[in-house]
Image: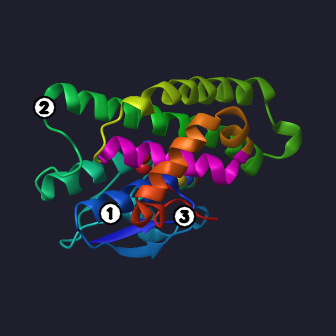
Amino acid sequence: MRLLYSKPSPYSSKVRMAAHLCDLHLDLVPTNTGDEAAELTEANPLGKIPALILDDGSTLYDSRVICEYLDRLTGNPIIPQAADAWAATKRIEALADGMTEAAMAALYEKRYRPEPMWYEPWMDKQWRRAHRALDALEREVTALPEKPNLAHLAVSSDLAWVQLRFPEELNGRHPKLAGWLGRFFASHPELAALAPQA
Ligand SMILES: N[C@@H](CCC(=O)N[C@@H](CS)C(=O)NCC(=O)O)C(=O)O
Protein backbone atom coordinates (compact mmCIF):
# COMPACT_ATOMS: atom_id res chain seq x y z
CA MET A 1 0.00 0.00 0.00
CA ARG A 2 1.22 3.50 -0.87
CA LEU A 3 0.48 6.53 1.26
CA LEU A 4 0.45 9.98 -0.31
CA TYR A 5 1.56 12.16 2.58
CA SER A 6 3.69 15.03 3.74
CA LYS A 7 5.90 15.28 6.82
CA PRO A 8 4.15 18.26 8.44
CA SER A 9 0.62 16.90 7.83
CA PRO A 10 -1.04 15.93 11.15
CA TYR A 11 -3.58 13.67 9.47
CA SER A 12 -0.81 11.84 7.60
CA SER A 13 1.06 11.50 10.88
CA LYS A 14 -2.00 9.90 12.51
CA VAL A 15 -2.27 7.38 9.66
CA ARG A 16 1.44 6.52 9.86
CA MET A 17 1.12 5.99 13.63
CA ALA A 18 -1.95 3.82 13.03
CA ALA A 19 -0.07 1.70 10.46
CA HIS A 20 2.76 1.29 12.95
CA LEU A 21 0.45 0.03 15.73
CA CYS A 22 -1.32 -2.23 13.21
CA ASP A 23 2.09 -3.59 12.19
CA LEU A 24 1.51 -2.69 8.55
CA HIS A 25 4.10 -1.34 6.14
CA LEU A 26 3.13 1.63 3.96
CA ASP A 27 5.30 2.89 1.10
CA LEU A 28 5.52 6.63 1.63
CA VAL A 29 5.06 9.00 -1.32
CA PRO A 30 5.94 12.61 -0.40
CA THR A 31 3.18 14.76 -1.89
CA ASN A 32 2.84 18.52 -2.21
CA THR A 33 -0.89 19.29 -2.39
CA GLY A 34 -0.11 22.69 -3.95
CA ASP A 35 1.02 20.93 -7.14
CA GLU A 36 -2.39 19.28 -7.62
CA ALA A 37 -0.49 16.47 -9.36
CA ALA A 38 -2.52 13.86 -11.23
CA GLU A 39 -1.36 11.08 -8.88
CA LEU A 40 -2.98 12.93 -5.97
CA THR A 41 -6.19 14.10 -7.64
CA GLU A 42 -6.71 10.66 -9.20
CA ALA A 43 -6.24 9.05 -5.80
CA ASN A 44 -8.36 11.66 -4.02
CA PRO A 45 -10.51 14.03 -6.09
CA LEU A 46 -10.47 16.38 -3.09
CA GLY A 47 -6.73 16.88 -3.69
CA LYS A 48 -5.92 16.36 -0.02
CA ILE A 49 -3.53 14.16 1.90
CA PRO A 50 -3.40 11.59 3.30
CA ALA A 51 -4.63 9.30 0.53
CA LEU A 52 -3.96 5.58 0.48
CA ILE A 53 -3.48 3.61 -2.75
CA LEU A 54 -4.23 -0.06 -2.18
CA ASP A 55 -2.39 -2.87 -3.93
CA ASP A 56 -5.30 -3.35 -6.37
CA GLY A 57 -5.11 0.34 -7.36
CA SER A 58 -8.24 1.41 -5.49
CA THR A 59 -7.88 4.35 -3.15
CA LEU A 60 -9.01 5.45 0.30
CA TYR A 61 -9.37 8.82 1.99
CA ASP A 62 -9.66 10.64 4.36
CA SER A 63 -7.51 9.89 7.39
CA ARG A 64 -10.45 8.62 9.46
CA VAL A 65 -11.47 6.14 6.78
CA ILE A 66 -7.88 5.02 6.29
CA CYS A 67 -7.38 4.42 10.02
CA GLU A 68 -10.65 2.46 10.21
CA TYR A 69 -9.51 0.36 7.25
CA LEU A 70 -6.07 -0.42 8.69
CA ASP A 71 -7.71 -1.31 12.00
CA ARG A 72 -10.25 -3.66 10.40
CA LEU A 73 -7.57 -5.27 8.25
CA THR A 74 -5.63 -6.30 11.34
CA GLY A 75 -8.28 -7.32 13.89
CA ASN A 76 -8.98 -3.95 15.57
CA PRO A 77 -5.76 -3.26 17.48
CA ILE A 78 -6.42 0.50 17.70
CA ILE A 79 -10.20 1.01 17.71
CA PRO A 80 -12.18 -0.52 20.58
CA GLN A 81 -15.28 -2.28 19.25
CA ALA A 82 -17.62 -2.11 22.27
CA ALA A 83 -20.12 0.68 21.56
CA ASP A 84 -19.22 2.98 24.47
CA ALA A 85 -15.46 2.68 24.05
CA TRP A 86 -15.79 3.04 20.25
CA ALA A 87 -17.86 6.20 20.68
CA ALA A 88 -15.41 7.72 23.17
CA THR A 89 -12.44 6.98 20.90
CA LYS A 90 -14.05 8.32 17.72
CA ARG A 91 -15.42 11.42 19.48
CA ILE A 92 -11.96 12.36 20.73
CA GLU A 93 -10.54 11.78 17.27
CA ALA A 94 -13.21 14.11 15.86
CA LEU A 95 -12.45 16.71 18.54
CA ALA A 96 -8.68 16.65 17.98
CA ASP A 97 -8.94 16.62 14.19
CA GLY A 98 -11.61 19.34 14.27
CA MET A 99 -9.34 21.51 16.43
CA THR A 100 -6.60 21.17 13.84
CA GLU A 101 -9.01 21.79 10.99
CA ALA A 102 -9.99 25.15 12.55
CA ALA A 103 -6.41 26.23 13.25
CA MET A 104 -5.40 25.10 9.76
CA ALA A 105 -8.22 27.14 8.21
CA ALA A 106 -6.84 30.22 10.00
CA LEU A 107 -3.33 29.32 8.81
CA TYR A 108 -4.48 28.85 5.20
CA GLU A 109 -6.27 32.23 5.27
CA LYS A 110 -2.88 33.89 5.67
CA ARG A 111 -0.97 31.43 3.51
CA TYR A 112 -3.22 31.46 0.47
CA ARG A 113 -4.95 34.85 0.48
CA PRO A 114 -3.23 38.20 -0.13
CA GLU A 115 -2.98 40.26 3.07
CA PRO A 116 -5.58 42.89 2.10
CA MET A 117 -8.10 40.04 1.78
CA TRP A 118 -7.51 38.47 5.18
CA TYR A 119 -10.84 38.45 6.99
CA GLU A 120 -10.21 38.82 10.72
CA PRO A 121 -13.74 37.92 12.00
CA TRP A 122 -13.57 34.62 10.16
CA MET A 123 -10.08 33.83 11.45
CA ASP A 124 -11.20 34.81 14.98
CA LYS A 125 -14.10 32.39 14.72
CA GLN A 126 -11.73 29.58 13.72
CA TRP A 127 -9.50 30.37 16.69
CA ARG A 128 -12.45 30.44 19.11
CA ARG A 129 -13.37 26.98 17.80
CA ALA A 130 -9.78 25.72 18.16
CA HIS A 131 -9.46 27.18 21.68
CA ARG A 132 -12.70 25.55 22.83
CA ALA A 133 -11.48 22.24 21.43
CA LEU A 134 -8.08 22.59 23.13
CA ASP A 135 -9.82 23.39 26.44
CA ALA A 136 -11.97 20.27 26.00
CA LEU A 137 -8.95 18.14 25.08
CA GLU A 138 -7.22 19.31 28.25
CA ARG A 139 -10.07 17.71 30.21
CA GLU A 140 -10.32 14.63 27.98
CA VAL A 141 -6.69 13.48 27.93
CA THR A 142 -6.72 12.70 31.65
CA ALA A 143 -9.34 9.99 31.00
CA LEU A 144 -7.56 8.26 28.11
CA PRO A 145 -6.76 4.59 28.77
CA GLU A 146 -3.15 3.55 29.35
CA LYS A 147 -2.80 1.51 26.14
CA PRO A 148 -2.60 3.78 23.06
CA ASN A 149 -5.57 3.67 20.74
CA LEU A 150 -6.77 5.84 17.86
CA ALA A 151 -7.72 8.65 20.25
CA HIS A 152 -4.11 8.91 21.49
CA LEU A 153 -2.87 8.94 17.90
CA ALA A 154 -5.24 11.72 16.84
CA VAL A 155 -4.57 13.84 19.93
CA SER A 156 -0.79 13.43 19.76
CA SER A 157 -0.46 14.06 16.02
CA ASP A 158 -2.80 17.07 16.18
CA LEU A 159 -1.14 18.58 19.26
CA ALA A 160 2.31 18.04 17.76
CA TRP A 161 1.15 19.94 14.67
CA VAL A 162 -0.06 22.83 16.85
CA GLN A 163 3.28 22.80 18.63
CA LEU A 164 5.03 22.96 15.25
CA ARG A 165 2.94 25.76 13.74
CA PHE A 166 1.72 27.70 16.79
CA PRO A 167 4.06 26.75 19.67
CA GLU A 168 2.67 29.47 21.97
CA GLU A 169 -0.83 27.97 21.76
CA LEU A 170 0.38 24.81 23.42
CA ASN A 171 3.36 25.80 25.52
CA GLY A 172 1.85 29.14 26.60
CA ARG A 173 -1.95 28.67 26.62
CA HIS A 174 -2.24 24.93 27.25
CA PRO A 175 0.79 23.79 29.27
CA LYS A 176 -1.13 20.76 30.58
CA LEU A 177 -1.58 19.53 27.02
CA ALA A 178 2.08 20.25 26.25
CA GLY A 179 2.94 18.18 29.33
CA TRP A 180 0.67 15.33 28.27
CA LEU A 181 2.22 15.33 24.79
CA GLY A 182 5.76 15.33 26.14
CA ARG A 183 5.00 12.41 28.46
CA PHE A 184 3.15 10.44 25.77
CA PHE A 185 5.98 10.79 23.26
CA ALA A 186 8.60 10.01 25.93
CA SER A 187 6.76 6.72 26.63
CA HIS A 188 6.28 5.98 22.92
CA PRO A 189 9.40 7.15 21.05
CA GLU A 190 8.40 5.04 18.01
CA LEU A 191 5.24 7.20 17.69
CA ALA A 192 7.14 10.42 18.44
CA ALA A 193 9.31 9.65 15.40
CA LEU A 194 6.15 9.81 13.23
CA ALA A 195 4.91 13.18 14.58
CA PRO A 196 4.48 16.10 12.15
CA GLN A 197 7.79 17.68 11.21
CA ALA A 198 8.69 20.86 9.34
N1 LIG B 1 -10.45 15.44 6.85
C1 LIG B 1 -9.23 15.21 6.12
C2 LIG B 1 -8.38 16.48 6.12
C3 LIG B 1 -7.20 16.35 5.18
C4 LIG B 1 -6.47 17.66 5.04
O1 LIG B 1 -7.01 18.76 5.27
N2 LIG B 1 -5.20 17.56 4.66
C5 LIG B 1 -4.39 18.74 4.43
C6 LIG B 1 -2.95 18.49 4.83
S1 LIG B 1 -2.80 18.12 6.52
C7 LIG B 1 -4.41 19.07 2.96
O2 LIG B 1 -4.38 18.17 2.14
N3 LIG B 1 -4.45 20.35 2.64
C8 LIG B 1 -4.37 20.83 1.30
C9 LIG B 1 -5.57 21.61 0.88
O3 LIG B 1 -6.52 21.78 1.67
O4 LIG B 1 -5.54 22.07 -0.25
C10 LIG B 1 -8.46 14.02 6.73
O5 LIG B 1 -8.74 13.68 7.89
O6 LIG B 1 -7.65 13.39 6.03
Q: Is residue 134 left or right of residue 166?
A: left
Q: Quadrant of the N terminus?
A: bottom left
How far apart are the two marked residues, 3 and 2, measured between alpha carbons?
Answer: 40 Å
Residue occupied by mark 3: 36
Name the residue type under label 1: Leu
Residue 48 visible in the snapshot:
no
Residue pictured at 64% horizontal, 37% vertical: 175
Please state if 64 lies on the left or on the right of 170 as rendered: left
Q: Position of residue 53 (x, y in %)?
A: 30, 67
Rendering quarter of residue 16? bottom left
Q: Nearer the viewer, residue 102 or 138?
A: 138
Tell me which segment is drawn in magenta. Answer: 148-167
Looking at the image, do the residues carrying marks 1 and 2 touch, with CB atoms under 8 Å apart? Answer: no
Label 3 environment density (alpha carbons within 10 Å; few <14, some 14–19, many ≥20):
some
Which-is-in-front pick, marks 1 and 2?
2
Number of marks in the rendered image? 3
Q: Main secondary structure of the magenta part?
A: helix
What residue does disc 2 label?
A: 82
Measure how far apart labels 3 and 1 are at the Cα level: 16 Å
Q: Residue visible at 73% across and 37% down?
A: 172
Residue at label 1? 52
**Image colouring:** rainbow
- Disc 2 residue type (three-letter): Ala
Residue 197 belongs to magenta span:
no
The answer to whether marks 3 and 2 mark residues whose Cβ atoms lie closer than 8 Å is no
Ligand 1 within 8 angstroms of badge 1 C-beta: no
Determine the CA span between mark 1 and mark 2: 27 Å
Residue 17 lies, in percent from the top left, at 37, 59
